[in-house]
Image: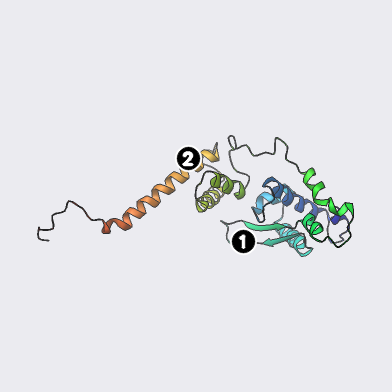
Amino acid sequence: MRLFSSDDTIGATHRSLYLALFELWNQYHFPELLTINSKKVMQAAKINSRTTYLKHIKCIEKSGYITYSPSNDARVGSKIKLIRFDTVVEQNLNKPSSNNERTVVQNMGALYKPTNKQIINTSKQAEPEDLNEVLIYFKKQQWKQSDGEDFYWYNENQNWKARDGEPINSWQHYAKKWTTKADQKRTHEMKKRLGNLYVNPNKDYSQPL
């Protein structure tokens, strides 16, 4: 955040938005690319207007703190890459740097070190935090990532309610049912496509057609 303090283009809303993105990045162990749900980021950053959100995230990108790849598909989240200033300092060994510069990311990481309440509780969550959490869970279960994306965006649009209108108690349990049905559907479609190619080994070919 000390970099922000010397940047005249960065205001309070920029800081709030960047910290919301950084917290997600820290939560998922600093992936190269972070898939985000703009609605959830806006809630975390206390931004009510989507116009304000887009204006400030583009300004942060222009200032060189992130790269932003917006998604035009409502089912797919946007991609964010947060620039690691610690690696920039480490790689530029010939350039003198202050202790303050070297500890920027370390200090921010300590500031957003997850507490016990922030750690994902995979046994009690009614709904996931975002698409990243779902994809991580699907990967751990060795389920198809495409099923994870379909599962997340369908239920996100349904406000995480079951078909009877009742809230989902455990999205992980619901995800297992989803993948089971998806596998059954794929198996049925495959059998249907291959049905005409099936040859009965007991068929008597001496009989006329």
Q: Which mark sits nearer the N-terminus, 2 or 1?
A: 1
Categorize mark 2 by other alpha carbons within 10 Å: few (<14), some (14-19), many (20+): few
| Residue 164: numbered disc | 2
Q: What residue type is labelled 1?
A: Ser
Side of 8 where 145 appears, left or right: left
Side of 33 where 55 appears, left or right: right
Extreme residue toward the bottom, this view: 62
Q: Position of residue 122 (x, y in %)?
A: 59, 38
* Residue at x-position 62% and y-position 61%: 71
Q: Where is residue 68 in the image (x, y as percent from the top left)?
A: 69, 61
Q: Position of residue 148 (x, y in %)?
A: 53, 49
Side of 148 where 197 appears, left or right: left
Categorize mark 1 by other alpha carbons within 10 Å: few (<14), some (14-19), many (20+): few
Q: What residue type is labelled 2?
A: Asp
* Residue at x-position 13% and y-position 58%: 205
Classify the position of the C terminus by image quarter: bottom left
Q: Camera-side residue: 181 or 43?
A: 181
Q: Camera-side residue: 172 or 205?
A: 205
Residue 12 showing in the rendered view: yes
Side of 118 where 5 appears, left or right: right
Residue for badge 1: 71
Between disc 2 and disc 1, the foreground one is 1
Residue 43 showing in the rendered view: no
Q: Camera-side residue: 140 or 24?
A: 140
Residue 140 location, quadrant:
top right
Q: Where is residue 38 in the image (x, y as percent from the top left)?
A: 66, 54
* Residue at x-position 58% and y-position 57%: 76
Q: In this view, does 14 lie above or below 170?
A: below
